[in-house]
């Protein structure tokens, strides 16, 4: 334990060294808040003066208030919601260890995000990585002038303070890394967990976020002449036209795949398959699931970046799909196991939340119904039938719920975005704001490619990161410590006094 701080410092140094290939001089305005480049080379002088005379857009207080609230809701999803959800599902001797890992990983990733993660994800660089223009959040606030940089939303002329966007996205990055912890619960070294997170966050989360979500913002699309140029500056999957409203690929598939790789590489828990390892406190798990459901409205509806109709659509879809998944999961349990369970209801809620995430603002009410019910049944199979087929000890079913639910939601987004199925379609022309839809086959293929890239990228980075950590400090605690429980062995504490 005394070497954790020193090791993290080394990992940070390695991370920065590995990023030297990224473009070091990203344009100052190359981020979601990028202001439109004026196409004044051929514009009449009068028109140019008219453009110059336009005042800079100012944020709406309602939008800012909504985004601050959404950020708090997403923060609550990790601490305490995910911590309680995971903490109740492990054995009593590992409860505090689980709570500690979530609490500290969330804090670690928040710091990394503000140092370099945000810059890598949301500034202009190339199709895979952003640049280093926003290291330590440089340029987001001018203390001497009292001026705040603005971040674009999805509407022309509508902005929010960039620092609000930074904070909102920080919570996404942090909870994604925390999700992985459930797959390797009850046998991973605390120091190894932190070291792995530094590497995986740097080389998997940040680039996937950039590939899916970075673009130049709607105000950059001033005329048809600049469309190709602006599109070429976006992340790879954005250029392809992949739809991911709030993180089906970036958050759930990304973390679920990393969790499965970890489960394989760290090995099964002692006694797995021979000894019963039931959740020790389903009350904590139920409370955690309920808080996750509540916080997820910030996660999904907040991803509209404005307090508008799209946020309302994402809100009701999140609400509805989750309820449908709960009913589907317990119905499946009743049919195949004879009894519905509280753990099943809580797991069904999370499955529905996961699956609707990429679709929340991208589908209509019919899509929410189908995605929710499908998630309940598919993820139930994922944590039972599929888990047996894979043969990995994914302790808290991160892959079966998050990766599988994320894949399902990402693919069905491509189907139910269709206006003929109640979807809103997608913006095909950012200059005029014209919406359309390329067809189910075409969009489904785009979604499938995005899913494939995410799976391969996350798996590869995770495997390398786990191996590096294993070679240096080791991934797994000793057999003696595992049998004793990580609460006492790693932290010298106990959740319960007997």
Image: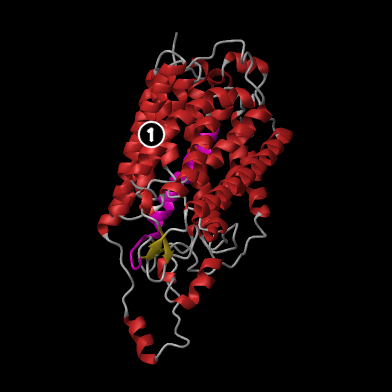
Q: Residue furthest right?
A: 471
Give the secondary structure at mark 1.
Answer: helix
Task: Evaluate whether residue 494 shows in this view.
Answer: yes
Q: Residue furthest bottom?
A: 45
In the displayed structure image, the side of residue 271 where residue 36 appears, left or right: left
Is 67 rendered above or below residue 40?
Answer: above
| Of residues 220 and 332, the one drawn nearer to the viewer in this rendering | 332
Instruction: Residue at 41%, 28% (x, y): give it.
Output: 348
| Quadrant that contains the N terminus | top right
Q: Is residue 174 magenta?
A: yes
Instruction: Residue at 64%, 49% (x, y): give it.
Output: 15
Is 430 rendered above or below residue 385?
Answer: below
| Of residues 439 and 194, the one drawn nearer to the viewer in this rendering | 439
In the displayed structure image, the side of residue 32 where residue 156 appears, left or right: left
Instruction: Residue at 43%, 54% (x, y): give it.
Output: 166
Q: Quadrant of residue 161?
A: bottom left
Q: Which residue is mark 1?
A: 292
Q: Is residue 335 magenta?
A: no
Task: Evaluate whether residue 396 shows in this view.
Answer: no
> Where's residue 482, x and y in %?
61, 18
Magenta stretch, residue numbers:
156-180
Q: Main secondary structure of the magenta part?
A: helix
Is 278 rendered above or below residue 130?
Answer: above
> Where's residue 69, x and y in %?
31, 46
């Amino acid at each position: 334990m005394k070497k954790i701080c020193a090791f993290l410092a080394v990992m940070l140094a390695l991370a920065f060294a590995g990023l030297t290939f990224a473009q070091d001089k990203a344009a100052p305005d190359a981020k979601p808040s990028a202001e439109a480049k004026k196409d004044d080379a051929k514009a009449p002088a009068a028109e140019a003066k008219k453009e110059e005379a336009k005042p800079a857009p100012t944020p709406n207080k309602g939008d800012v208030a909504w985004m601050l609230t959404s950020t708090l809701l997403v923060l609550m999803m990790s601490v305490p919601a995910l911590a309680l959800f995971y903490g109740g599902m492990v054995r009593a001797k590992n409860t505090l260890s689980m709570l500690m890992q979530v609490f500290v990983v969330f804090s670690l990733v928040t710091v990394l995000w503000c140092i370099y993660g945000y810059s890598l994800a949301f500034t202009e660089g190339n199709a895979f990585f952003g640049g280093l223009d926003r290291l330590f959040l440089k340029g987001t606030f001018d203390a001497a002038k009292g001026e705040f940089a603005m971040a674009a939303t999805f509407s022309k002329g509508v902005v929010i303070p960039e620092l609000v966007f930074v904070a909102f996205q920080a919570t996404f990055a942090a909870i994604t890394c925390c999700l992985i912890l459930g797959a390797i619960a009850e046998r991973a070294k605390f120091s190894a967990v932190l070291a792995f997170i530094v590497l995986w966050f740097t080389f998997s989360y940040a680039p996937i976020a950039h590939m899916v979500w970075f673009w130049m913002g709607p105000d950059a699309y001033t005329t048809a002449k600049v469309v190709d140029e602006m599109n070429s500056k976006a992340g790879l999957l954005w250029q392809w036209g992949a739809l991911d409203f709030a993180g089906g690929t970036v958050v759930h598939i990304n973390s679920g795949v990393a969790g499965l790789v970890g489960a394989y590489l760290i090995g099964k828990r002692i006694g797995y398959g021979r000894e019963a390892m039931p959740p020790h406190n389903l009350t904590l798990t139920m409370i955690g699931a309920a808080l996750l459901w509540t916080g997820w409205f910030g996660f999904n509806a907040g991803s509209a970046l404005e307090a508008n109709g799209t946020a309302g659509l994402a809100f009701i879809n999140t609400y509805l799909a989750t309820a449908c998944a709960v009913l589907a999961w317990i119905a499946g349990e009743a049919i195949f196991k004879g009894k519905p369970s509280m753990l099943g209801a809580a797991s069904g809620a999370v499955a529905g939340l996961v699956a609707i995430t990429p679709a929340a603002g991208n589908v209509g009410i019919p899509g929410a119904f189908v995605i929710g019910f499908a998630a309940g049944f598919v993820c139930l199979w994922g944590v039972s039938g599929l888990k047996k087929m894979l043969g990995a000890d994914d302790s808290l079913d991160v892959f079966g719920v998050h990766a599988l639910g994320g894949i399902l939601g990402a693919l069905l987004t491509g189907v139910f975005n269709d206006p003929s199925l109640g979807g809103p379609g997608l913006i095909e022309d950012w200059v005029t704001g014209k919406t359309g839809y390329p067809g189910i086959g075409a969009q489904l293929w785009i979604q499938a490619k995005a899913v494939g890239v995410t799976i391969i990228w996350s798996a590869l980075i995770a495997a390398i990161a786990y191996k590096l950590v294993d070679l240096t400090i080791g991934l797994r605690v000793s057999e003696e410590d595992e049998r004793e429980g990580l609460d006492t062995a790693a932290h010298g504490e106990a959740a319960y006094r007997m």
